[in-house]
Image: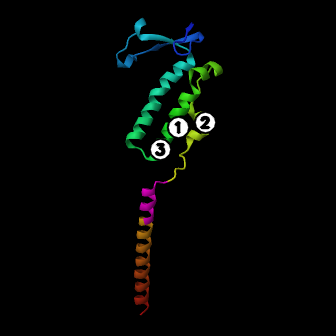
Amino acid sequence: MRVGNCVRCAANGPVDRHHIKMRMEGGGDEDENLEDRCVPCHQYIHATPAIKEFLEHERRHGQADRIVVAQLRFDRHEEYNSVEQIRLRGTYKSYWEDEVTHFLPLIEPTPEIKEWRRLNRNKRQRENRAFDKKMAKAAKEKKC
């Protein structure tokens, strides 16, 4: 670790050398590919792609409640690790430290979902009545 100024928050102190293009993607150790980042900003920049990827995955494949949670996690990540917050706190803060991000929110169903539930509930009720009648008839025939 060396002493310098963070390119993100301008903090003066210990900094990590961050590879702009990661080595596994073909980036090298040349000065043009390196930038100084304080530890919190370095943690932030490495956590961000995974959180964005999760959000994009949920937008493509997720249900509405999972998309809301992914967006909430991304928003909290950004809020907690803004330049101002890192300057004030001096540390990186994970969205996971906020218990709200652990649970799926309660979402009011859309009118379409309410209608679908109503129709399926009625269908299940009809099926259950038919099954009960069938079982009662079978029981009556067994007694005879």
Mark 1 vs mark 3: which is more N-terminal? 3
Q: Secondary structure at mark 3?
A: helix
> Where are the magenta residues, as a range?
109-118
Residue displayed at 34% across by 16% down: 26
- Is 108 rendered above or below residue 40? below
Residue 78 in picture, x, y percent from top left = 53, 28
The answer to whether any part of residue 29 appears in the image is no
Amino acid marked by disc 2: Asp
Q: Among all residues in the image, which is located at the extreme front? A: 111
Residue at the left extreme of this rendering: 26
Nearest to N terminus: mark 2 or mark 1:
1
Q: Residue at x 44, y 31 (%)?
A: 52
The image shows a total of numbered marks equal to: 3
Indicate the position of residue 66 as horizontal and vertical percent values: 47, 44
Residue density around tag 1, few if under 14, some if 14–19, many if 20 or more, within 10 Å: some
Disc on res. 72: 1
User: Tag 3: Cα neighbours inside 10 Å, few (<14), some, or many (≥20)?
Assistant: some
Q: Which mark is residue 66?
A: 3
What secondary structure do most residues of the magenta stretch adopt?
Answer: helix
Label drawn at residue 22: none
Could you tell me the amino acid type at mark 3?
Arg
Residue 98 is tagged as: 2
Judge depth for marks 2 and 1 and give the one in front.
1
Above or below, 15 relative to 126:
above
Q: Position of residue 125 (x, y in %)?
A: 44, 72
Q: Residue at x 52, y 52 (%)?
A: 108
Circle 2 packing at 10 Å, graded few (<14), some (14-19), many (20+), is: few
Relative side of 2 to 124, left or right: right
94 above or below 126? above
**Percent position (x, y) of residue 41?**
54, 19
